[in-house]
Image (cartoon, grey):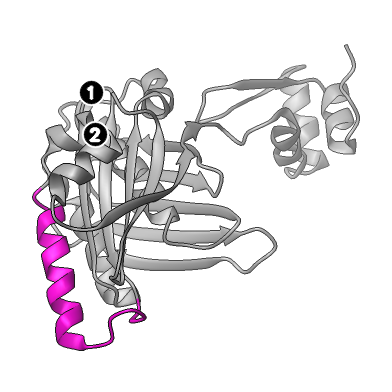
Amino acid sequence: MPADINQRFLFDGTDVRGELVHVTQAYRDMTAAHGYPAPVRNLLGEMLVAVVLLSGTIKYRGRLILQVRSQGQVPLAMVETSNEGKVRGIARLSPDVTDFNEDFHTLLQDGTLVMTVEPEGGERYQSIVPLLADTFAGCIEAYFAQSEQLGTRLSLAVSEDQAAGILLQQLPPQLITDQAERENQWQHLAILGQSVTAEELLNLNSEALLGRLYVQDPVRLVDQRQVMFECSCSAARAARSIAELGSEQLDYLFEEDDVITVDCEFCLAKYEFTRESLSELVRGDEPSH
């Protein structure tokens, strides 16, 4: 079974690039403890693969975040990745729903997709598009058609314990400048790419998968990086978020209880603070024992 990887590939002599993503452990680590219903878990799996695929299209140090908001059964779902391949994600479910539906538009009725790039030391960039297609992959393709005007094709596959996907993207003209030739080349590679099956995506490694899809095309594997679940929460961050409540609110909370508890929604870690340990962490000191 393929490892948790993000693999880039190129077609020699063309202006087309691609990304492959396969996640098993990272997908399990992100979703298992939450006990999501299967349709919600599958949605998060698709979003996880998509955000990692898209991170390969951006030159940045920082975070890429995909977020969907809706009036449906899943009011909020978000997944993010760092440029180092560290991922985390979460979904919030409608409390009125007991039977979650596989139908994309039922899960995400009247939904919008928000894509956010947060570069280190740079300006935050965000774009918003409606979720009009019938699949999450289709919504990403529509985003690129509308916002970037780049030919982009995605295929995503999710099972109970793994998720995978492939992205193809047409680059600005460099090697091939004739428009008709560019379009023929792109259509040829995109059609072959979209012939991939879910079983192939989930069970074949990069070499075998590309060899099966592109028997006669000069495809070359290049950069590969690991994908891993890692939450960015910490005791210090939790302490700073509490301190921002202000002294009056803090006094009230500590009058109610000697310990304030903060739960991380992503990894379910719990942080407990006394008044003294909170002050030490906010100052940047090591907490007392």
**Identity, as a three-letter code, of the amino acid under mark 2:** Asn
Tell me if mark 1 has few (under 14), some (14-19) or many (20+) residues whose alpha carbon lies within 10 angstroms of its own: few
Find residue 86 and report its horizontal and vertical position in percent: 52, 38
On the rendered structure, is 277 left or right of 159?
right
Find residue 278 and report its horizontal and vertical position in percent: 82, 28
- The residue nearer to you, when weighing 27 against 67, is 27
- The residue nearer to you, when weighing 266 against 49, is 49
Secondary structure character of the magenta stretch overall: helix
The span shown in magenta is: 172-195
Q: Residue at x 10, y 40 (%)?
A: 197
SS label for mark 2: helix
On the rendered structure, is 119 left or right of 91?
right
Considering only vertical position in the picture, is 56 above or below 1?
below
Q: Evaluate whether residue 96 shows in this view.
A: no
- Which quadrant holds residue 173? bottom left
Q: Disc 1 designates what residue?
A: 160
Find residue 67 and report its horizontal and vertical position in percent: 39, 51
Q: Residue farthest to the top?
A: 289
